[in-house]
Amino acid sequence: MSEEKARVLVVDDDPDLLDLVQRSLSAYGFEVLTHTSALGVSNLVRSVEPDFVLIDVNFPALKGDKVVNLARQYALPKTKFILYSASDESKLRSLALASGADGYISKSVQGEELAQRLRAFHLKPRPPTPTPAPAT
């Protein structure tokens, strides 16, 4: 990562988890912003320009995997969207692929390991957006 701190937007409806992740990632050199709702994420992505959006998938009104599709339209090309959930890992993998997320991390991953995984995502290039085949 560059000399400036990587900015992480963490979106989850559990304030205790948000506090834990914020304190933990801040200790490892990340700038952390939090948001407690799936609503408004697109506006936040546009205004704060995060390097990462770490988003839970289980919101009552709008599921996190759907938010990825919406918010990506307003994000910088460098922004990585990562599903962050306590869901089964195979379900998370499928949701990440289906939603166009850049990956997933289980909520059981905390502290230094979470910071290391985010740094690994930072180094991993985003795959190009597929272009639709011309109609014949």
Image (spheres, helix red, strand yellow):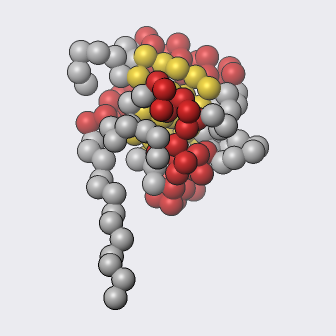
Residue at 70% x, 42% y is 59
Which quadrant holds the C terminus? bottom left
Front in this rendered view, residue 99 or 75 = 75
Residue 96 vs 35, above or below: the answer is: below
* Residue at the right extreme, as displayed: 60
Residue at 55% x, 38% y is 42
Residue at 38% x, 30% y is 51
Residue 131, percent across and down? 33, 66
Locate residue 4: give its quadrant.
top left
Which quadrant holds the N terminus? top left
* Left or right relative to 2: residue 64: right
Residue 106 in view of the camera = no
Residue at 34% x, 41% y is 77
Residue 92 vs 75, above or below: the answer is: below
* Residue at the bottom extreme, as displayed: 136
Residue 43, percent across and down? 56, 33
* Left or right relative to 67: residue 111: left
* Left or right relative to 130: residue 16: right
Front in this rendered view, residue 83 or 46 = 46
Residue 23 in view of the camera = yes
Residue 130 vs 88, above or below: the answer is: below
Residue 35, percent across and down? 62, 26
Locate residue 12: give its quadrant.
top right
Residue 7, percent across and down? 41, 23
